[in-house]
Amino acid sequence: MVRKANLLFMDTITAILITVHIIISIALIALVLLNSGKGGGLSDMLGGPGSSGNIGQTLAERNLGRITAVVALLFAATTLSLFWFLD
Protein backbone atom coordinates (compact mmCIF):
# COMPACT_ATOMS: atom_id res chain seq x y z
CA MET A 1 0.00 0.00 0.00
CA VAL A 2 2.81 2.41 0.88
CA ARG A 3 4.62 1.54 -2.38
CA LYS A 4 1.51 2.32 -4.42
CA ALA A 5 1.03 5.68 -2.67
CA ASN A 6 4.69 6.52 -3.24
CA LEU A 7 4.38 5.72 -6.96
CA LEU A 8 1.29 7.89 -7.23
CA PHE A 9 3.12 10.76 -5.53
CA MET A 10 6.12 10.40 -7.87
CA ASP A 11 3.85 10.27 -10.93
CA THR A 12 2.07 13.43 -9.80
CA ILE A 13 5.34 15.27 -9.17
CA THR A 14 6.68 14.14 -12.55
CA ALA A 15 3.53 15.32 -14.35
CA ILE A 16 3.74 18.71 -12.63
CA LEU A 17 7.44 19.03 -13.47
CA ILE A 18 6.82 18.17 -17.13
CA THR A 19 4.06 20.79 -17.34
CA VAL A 20 6.24 23.45 -15.71
CA HIS A 21 9.16 22.46 -17.96
CA ILE A 22 7.05 22.91 -21.10
CA ILE A 23 5.84 26.34 -19.95
CA ILE A 24 9.39 27.42 -19.10
CA SER A 25 10.64 26.11 -22.45
CA ILE A 26 8.10 28.18 -24.37
CA ALA A 27 8.90 31.26 -22.26
CA LEU A 28 12.63 30.79 -22.82
CA ILE A 29 12.18 30.51 -26.59
CA ALA A 30 10.10 33.70 -26.63
CA LEU A 31 12.58 35.60 -24.45
CA VAL A 32 15.57 34.56 -26.55
CA LEU A 33 13.79 35.68 -29.69
CA LEU A 34 13.01 39.06 -28.09
CA ASN A 35 16.59 39.66 -26.96
CA SER A 36 18.79 41.78 -29.14
CA GLY A 37 21.62 40.24 -31.03
CA LYS A 38 23.85 42.18 -33.37
CA GLY A 39 20.82 43.50 -35.24
CA GLY A 40 18.92 45.14 -32.39
CA GLY A 41 16.07 42.88 -31.29
CA LEU A 42 13.48 44.39 -28.98
CA SER A 43 14.53 48.02 -29.45
CA ASP A 44 14.34 47.69 -33.25
CA MET A 45 10.98 45.97 -33.09
CA LEU A 46 9.45 48.63 -30.83
CA GLY A 47 11.24 51.57 -32.41
CA GLY A 48 13.13 52.52 -29.29
CA PRO A 49 16.04 54.95 -29.10
CA GLY A 50 18.59 52.18 -29.50
CA SER A 51 17.57 51.65 -33.09
CA SER A 52 18.68 55.08 -34.31
CA GLY A 53 22.22 55.04 -32.98
CA ASN A 54 24.77 53.30 -30.86
CA ILE A 55 23.41 54.64 -27.57
CA GLY A 56 23.62 51.47 -25.50
CA GLN A 57 21.12 49.18 -23.87
CA THR A 58 17.79 50.52 -22.75
CA LEU A 59 16.28 49.64 -19.38
CA ALA A 60 13.84 47.27 -21.08
CA GLU A 61 16.66 45.38 -22.77
CA ARG A 62 18.63 45.05 -19.51
CA ASN A 63 15.54 43.78 -17.68
CA LEU A 64 14.77 41.41 -20.54
CA GLY A 65 18.30 40.03 -20.27
CA ARG A 66 17.90 39.49 -16.54
CA ILE A 67 14.54 37.80 -16.95
CA THR A 68 16.00 35.57 -19.67
CA ALA A 69 18.83 34.54 -17.34
CA VAL A 70 16.39 33.66 -14.54
CA VAL A 71 14.18 31.65 -16.89
CA ALA A 72 17.27 29.85 -18.24
CA LEU A 73 18.24 28.89 -14.67
CA LEU A 74 14.70 27.64 -14.04
CA PHE A 75 14.92 25.63 -17.26
CA ALA A 76 18.16 24.03 -16.06
CA ALA A 77 16.63 23.30 -12.66
CA THR A 78 13.54 21.63 -14.12
CA THR A 79 15.73 19.64 -16.54
CA LEU A 80 17.85 18.31 -13.68
CA SER A 81 14.75 17.64 -11.57
CA LEU A 82 13.16 15.66 -14.38
CA PHE A 83 16.37 13.70 -14.82
CA TRP A 84 16.31 12.84 -11.14
CA PHE A 85 12.59 11.95 -11.01
CA LEU A 86 12.59 9.93 -14.24
CA ASP A 87 15.68 7.93 -13.30
Image (tube, grey):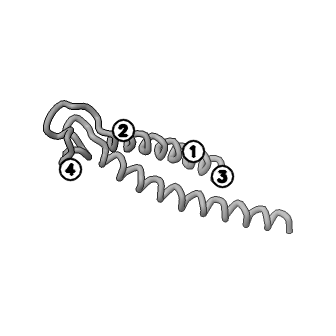
Q: CA distance from mark 1 to mark 2?
A: 23 Å
Q: Amino acid at mark 4?
A: Met
Horizontally, residue 50 falls left or right of residue 27, namely left
Mark seen at residue 85: 3
Camera-near label (1 vs 2) is 2
Labels 3 and 2: the sequence-earlier one: 2
Q: CA distance from mark 4 to mark 3?
A: 41 Å
Q: Residue furthest left?
A: 52
Q: Which residue is mark 4?
A: 45
Mark seen at residue 61: none
Which one is in front, 35 or 5? 35
The spot of residue 62 in percent (x, y) is: 36, 38
Labels 4 and 2: the sequence-earlier one: 4
Q: Which residue is mark 2?
A: 62
Labels 1 and 2: the sequence-earlier one: 2
The spot of residue 11 in percent (x, y) is: 67, 63
Q: Amino acid at mark 2?
A: Arg
Q: Quadrant of residue 60?
A: top left
Q: Which residue is mark 1?
A: 77
The spot of residue 72 in percent (x, y) is: 47, 43
Labels 3 and 1: the sequence-earlier one: 1
Q: Amino acid at mark 1?
A: Ala
Residue at disc 2, secondary structure: helix
In the depicted structure, whether residue 83 falls above or below residue 5: above
Labels 4 and 3: the sequence-earlier one: 4
